[in-house]
Amino acid sequence: MQEFDHIEALWAKHNTVDVKISADEMLKQAKKEVSGMRTKSLLTVVGMTLAFIALAILWFAIDFQSLTTHIGISLMIGAIIVYTIILYNNYRILAKSDFTANPNEFMAKLKLYQLKRFRLYNRLYWFYAIAISLGMAFYFLEILPHLALWAKITALVLSFGWMIFCSTLVRKAVIKKDKERIALLIEKFERISGQFKEQH
């Protein structure tokens, strides 16, 4: 029993130790996280640009006969261009900001980035998903009649299955992860800002 009391006393003592991370160390960690977000945003823009180039090459390389195919590819390319511009503008919010130069401005931009990401995955995503789905439907009107039945079923299931998967599970997971990550980052920068104020 005495040993248990001794262990309990040690545990209580351990819990009262306040582990403080210096503002500089916290700033270093936060900057690393922001750099990771910038890189991820830039890679998404690059990926969307590559998708645009691939579709444009397909459009000009193959002599499509049906007007619906041209409408379908135009819809997909239009959606990709609009979404890429929005993603690039979101990337610029983080890319042109530095916490050390102007902490308050950076915090405001980080909160703006959070709001724009929320809008992107909630309202604007559905515009993108509907435009891509319609584009694919128009595109398939010319392509599918030339395919075997198994190929038709496979193309439709894979294409629309992928869209449904991305619109539900992936989108929700990305929203949740983004929300938590950005909220934690904002909290970190607020704490860093508070520590800097205490020091000066």
Image (cartoon, helix red, strand yellow):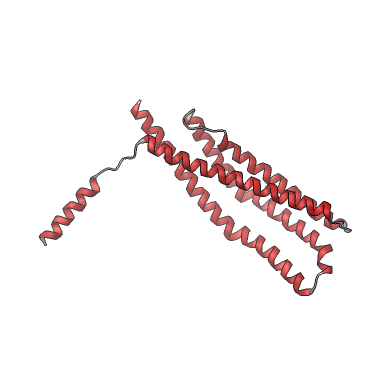
Which residue is situated farthest in the left direction here?
A: 2
Q: Is residue 144 left or right of residue 196?
A: right
Query: Where residue 9 appears, x then y in whole percent?
Result: 16, 52
User: Left or right: where does residue 59 sit relative to residue 15?
Assistant: right
Q: Quadrant of the N terminus?
A: bottom left
Q: Which residue appears at 39% of the width and 39% of the height?
A: 26
Please tell me in which quadrant of the rendered image residue 139 appears.
bottom right
The C terminus: image quadrant: top left
Give the percent coordinates (x, y) of residue 60.
Answer: 83, 51
Q: Residue at x 71, y 55 (%)?
A: 130
Relative horizontal placement of residue 178, taking residue 154 as reference (left or right): left
Could you tell me which residue is drawn at 10 percent across and 59 percent down? 2
> Residue 4, position in %: x, y?
15, 60
How many numbered callouts? Answer: 0
x 27%, y 43%: residue: 18
Would you place residue 102 above or below residue 54 in this image?
above
List x then y, in percent, for residue 193. 41, 33
